[in-house]
Amino acid sequence: MNNSELNNKIFDLVSFVTEELESPKPKENQNEDLVGIPVLFNLGEVKNIKTSRPDGYGNTIEAYKNNFGLDIQNYRKLRDVANKIIEIEPYASFATVTFIEEHLFDWIIETHNENKAKIEPLNYLQDAFENDLKEYRFYFRIHALGINSTFKIGQVEFTFFTDEELLDYSKKFKEQFPEKPKKECELIFKDYVSKPIAKVSSKGIQSKAKQNAQKQVNIAVDSLKCFLVEESVNSSTKIMDAEYRFTDTFPNSFIYDTKSDKFDFNLQFERADGIAPISLNSEKIKELFDSGLGEVSEFITNKPSNELSRIILNTISSIGKYSSERNLHERVVKIISIYESIFIPLKKGKGKGQTIVKSKVLKKIIGANELPMVVKIFNEFYDIRDKYLHNGLEKHIDIDDLFKAQKITTFLLKRLIQLNKKITSLKELLEHFEIK
């Protein structure tokens, strides 16, 4: 669909603008005697009121501005146009579909009110986009991590604010908002004192820039988790993550007894997650980079440009997710799913997975001397996976075997990155592993 067709579709929506139906007014003083219900005050006339109805997931399904707007049926048409525009650059890289919807909606209402268009809708949208397009620097807090030096993974710098930097920020904030009390200025930056942060630059409108920045942080954090194998199998360790996706499991307690005549009441406390944060000094960081994190960091610095590179990015994310999984049976399921999602063609069916993984895949990433031991581990893990998924049985998982399986999956990741220098598609990858 070209620009002319898109403009025409947006113009057509002006004729569908309708007046918002009045909501029934609440009876006066109906809540006056109820504790906890605030008293409503009449603040007079308010102009440029925009109301919208969401679908429960943050998406607008109808909207009105000063009582005029698009109902559900016609707002859906606006969303359809926005979905077409978001596929076009530069909006695909630097905007969101919500941004497009909101500004086209404003153009529709303005055109309806003026009874004429002052500017074509796509030009209106472009002006709004160019006005909001900026280069941002984001600082996301990282939980359960201790560092004493800065390092970079991909485009993300893991660092921390010095006391001097925080003091300077606080000073500048106070200068910009002189009416704010000094204590309030200090409280804003208090949570960043002695706290590791992920620092990353991103361009776009603010919401899109934030999305892109978080994607970069996610893949950088997951890349680091790929090589924290020892920490991930240690039950006393809390696995680090960015604050916005960090989950903290609190200790829980429960009581129990039996039907015995003897009083056997018990109170028990337990914790499913560790408490010790991950500590990374400069020596440990160098060790991680030397063991393969450096290769992964170099890989994620570049945008995925082919099918295999996107598979590798998904593999990094999958390893990061299972590294944080404290239910070890779920972790085994996720480890096996990595291999099957890559190497098991749909026409083969998942039933062939175990045979292909141990006869085709493992021998390409593991030395001949260790192959029998590794095959034995994967045979056991397939059995554990199947009994867990199909029978609800939780068989014992050997921690040493889990450690080795995770190490091997890291070897697979490095192998895929090396192969990506000469092959680019899943078809070529399967041919390399002799999987037909």
Image: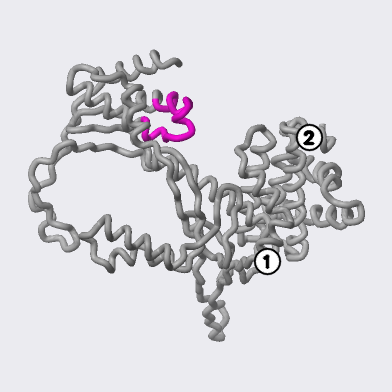
390 and 351: which one is in front? 351
Does the stretch in magenta take in 210?
no
Residue that numbered label 1 is attached to: 283
User: In the drawing, what numbered circle is on residue 430?
Assistant: 2
Residue, x 81% and y 57% (percent of image)?
Answer: 377
Residue 5 drawn at (x, y percent): 39, 14
Tell me the SS state at disc 2: helix
The three-letter code of the residue at mark 2 reads Leu
Provide residue 156's location: percent of width, then percent of height.
55, 51
Please give left or right for residue 434 compared with residue 47 in the image. Answer: right
Answer with mark 1 or mark 2, whichever residue precedes in sequence: 1
Which residue is located at x 74 percent, y 51 percent?
A: 409
Image quarter where the N terminus lies is top left
Q: Amino acid at mark 1?
A: Glu
Task: State which quarter of the image contains the C terminus.
Answer: top right
Q: Are marks 1 and 2 in contact (CB under 8 Å)?
A: no
> In the figure, residue 98 lies in which quadrant?
top left
What segment is highlighted magenta in the picture? 82-100
